[in-house]
Image: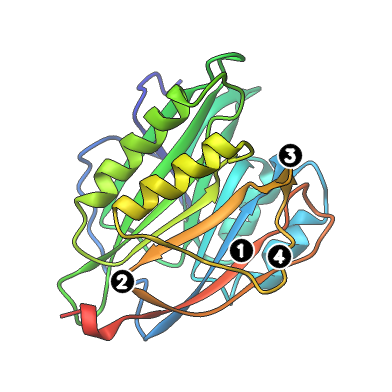
């Protein structure tokens, strides 16, 4: 099932799973961003191994217009969440086991106009990591919001594969003329990885979201989860302390930068 490499699986209420191939034409009937400000939840959900993770999603389902998950598995509980809250979920499966697909998933209140999926195989364990670019129209603007959701490769010697994965994603972001959010689990646990990450995002004009109380998951003393942005104003940012995953969710509120919009 689903032998194509570059595809996205779409889940929404009262519909069968839909296979989205590259260059798929998407008709958008409403706007994700209808007012000035909106909230994004970013979370490595740890394959939903801990039951309380669904309580966190339920709690923030109405507040967050965008939910960017890493290590999301297409379990009945998660698919029920999508259906019950009338969300649209686009999923890039990195791998599957017993017909359960795992990878990054972007959950939103409306359809994107464009989807681009990416996969990069871990050089040592050979299990892929995935990333997804979703582009959403903005009401009363010819510009669109690009949202990139990434789970970066983890187990590698040096940064060659890490750089390769980032470069594929950032090359597409660089071409985008409009606001951008790049977020996820970057696995930037080494000095070399972290320096490379900051260098690459700076070259395309992205800024990091900083947290006054920083409770992000760390490894070797460095945070793994990040939110970067461009063409938006940062209103508020916080980290939700929970034991529902081995990562804490990031909750960020943005305002459209009206000076950069049409």
Q: Are marks 4 and 3 in contact (CB under 8 Å)?
A: no
Q: Are marks 2 and 4 in contact (CB under 8 Å)?
A: no
Residue occupied by mark 4 = 214
Indicate which disc, 4 or 1, sits on the residue closer to the N terminus. 1
Q: CA distance from mark 2 to mark 4?
A: 24 Å
Q: With 163 as the anchor, is 190 left or right in this view?
A: right
- At x 48%, y 34%, the residue is 130
Residue occupied by mark 2 = 231
Indicate which disc, 3 or 1, sits on the residue closer to the N terminus. 1
Q: Is residue 162 above or below residue 199?
A: above
Q: With 149 as the anchor, is 191 left or right in this view?
A: right
Element assignment for label 1: helix
Q: Work out which quarter of the rendered image holds the C terminus and state it.
A: bottom left
Residue occupied by mark 3 = 220
Indicate which disc, 2 or 4, sits on the residue closer to the N terminus. 4
The residue mark sitting in front, 2 or 4, is 4
Q: Position of residue 103 (x, y in %)?
A: 55, 36
- At x 67%, y 74%, the residue is 212
The residue mark sitting in front, 1 or 2, is 2
- At x 31%, y 71%, the residue is 231
Name the mark on residue 84: 1
Q: CA distance from mark 2 to mark 3?
A: 32 Å
Element assignment for label 4: loop
- At x 37%, y 45%, the residue is 200
């Amino acid at each position: 099932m689903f032998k194509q490499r570059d595809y996205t699986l779409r889940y929404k209420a009262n519909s069968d799973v839909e296979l989205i191939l590259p260059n798929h034409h998407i008709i958008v009937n409403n706007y994700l961003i209808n007012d000035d400000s909106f909230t994004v939840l970013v979370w490595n959900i740890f394959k939903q191994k801990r039951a309380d993770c669904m309580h966190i999603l339920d709690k923030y389902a109405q507040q967050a217009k965008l939910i960017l998950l890493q290590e999301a598995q297409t379990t009945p509980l998660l698919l029920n969440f999508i259906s019950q809250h009338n969300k649209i979920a686009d999923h890039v499966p990195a791998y599957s086991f017993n017909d359960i697909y795992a990878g990054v998933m972007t959950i939103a209140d409306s359809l994107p106009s464009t989807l681009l999926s990416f996969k990069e195989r871990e050089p040592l364990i050979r299990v892929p990591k995935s990333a997804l670019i979703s582009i959403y129209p903005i009401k009363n603007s010819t510009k669109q919001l690009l949202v990139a959701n990434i789970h970066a490769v983890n187990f590698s010697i040096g940064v060659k594969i890490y750089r390769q994965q980032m470069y594929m994603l950032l090359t597409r972001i660089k071409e985008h003329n409009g606001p951008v959010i790049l977020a996820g689990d970057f696995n930037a646990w080494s000095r070399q990885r972290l320096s490379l990450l900051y260098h690459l995002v700076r070259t395309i004009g992205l800024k990091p979201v900083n947290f006054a109380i920083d409770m992000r998951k760390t490894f070797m003393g460095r945070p793994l989860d990040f939110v970067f942005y461009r063409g938006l104003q940062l209103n508020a940012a916080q980290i939700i302390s929970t034991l529902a995953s081995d990562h804490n969710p990031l909750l960020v509120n943005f305002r459209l930068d009206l000076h950069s919009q049409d």
